[in-house]
Amino acid sequence: MSCLARLGITALAAGAAVMISISSQVSAQSAEIRGTVAFEDGTAIPKGEIRIYIDQPADQGSAQDRTVETEVGSDGGSRAIAFALPPPTGSTALPGTRIVARLERADGWLLARGSAELTANAPVSITLHPAIH
């Protein structure tokens, strides 16, 4: 086999490896965390804003990163509200990672809170429980 032929095969293999790597990274980054939020007892979710974020176990004493979050509004009439949350940037979920939802009034007063453990490739179902002040 000539030197040019070997060089061409090597370049082709390297190009294929790069394409596979890029496509797997894009696929991993586009996987959103999806789920629903409902109020306990199946009643309508009170009016307010629901903040949903990822709560990972503290990694070696580092500060909690809440840069990955989303907000959805409740008009006071829905029994369940769907959400989609972007995955954590540059990391995978650690064991014990939870998705937390906080229902707050417009003035920031906490009305209800709930959380659920994040399971790979499964939708998250969060039940909100009224806050006791």
Image: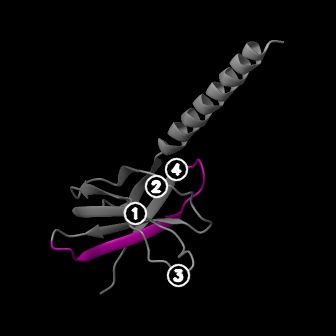
Query: Percent from the top left, x then y, of residue 29?
Result: 49, 44
Q: Residue shown at 60%/52% (left/top)?
A: 120
Q: CA distance from mark 4 to mark 2?
A: 19 Å
Q: CA distance from mark 4 to mark 1?
A: 15 Å
Q: Which residues, given as a range, are shown in magenta?
A: 107-122
Q: What residue did someone put label 4 on? A: 123
Q: Residue shown at 33%/84% (left/top)?
A: 132
Q: Disc 1 or disc 3, which is closer to the eye? A: 3
Give, as a three-letter code, the residue at label 3.
Answer: Gly
Give, as a three-letter code, the residue at label 4.
Answer: Pro
Q: Nearer the viewer, residue 132 or 55?
A: 55
Q: Which mark is residue 53?
A: 1
- Quadrant the N terminus occupies: top right
Q: CA distance from mark 3 to mark 2?
A: 19 Å
- Graded by Cα atoms within 10 Å as few (under 14), some (14 to 19) or many (20 or more), the crowding at tag 4 reads some
Q: Is residue 12 left or right of residue 93?
A: right
Disc on the earlier residue, 4 or 1: 1
Query: Percent from the top left, x then y, of residue 91?
Result: 54, 57
Under circle 3, the secondary element is: loop
- Quadrant the C terminus occupies: bottom left
Query: Percent from the top left, x then y, of residue 65?
Result: 42, 69
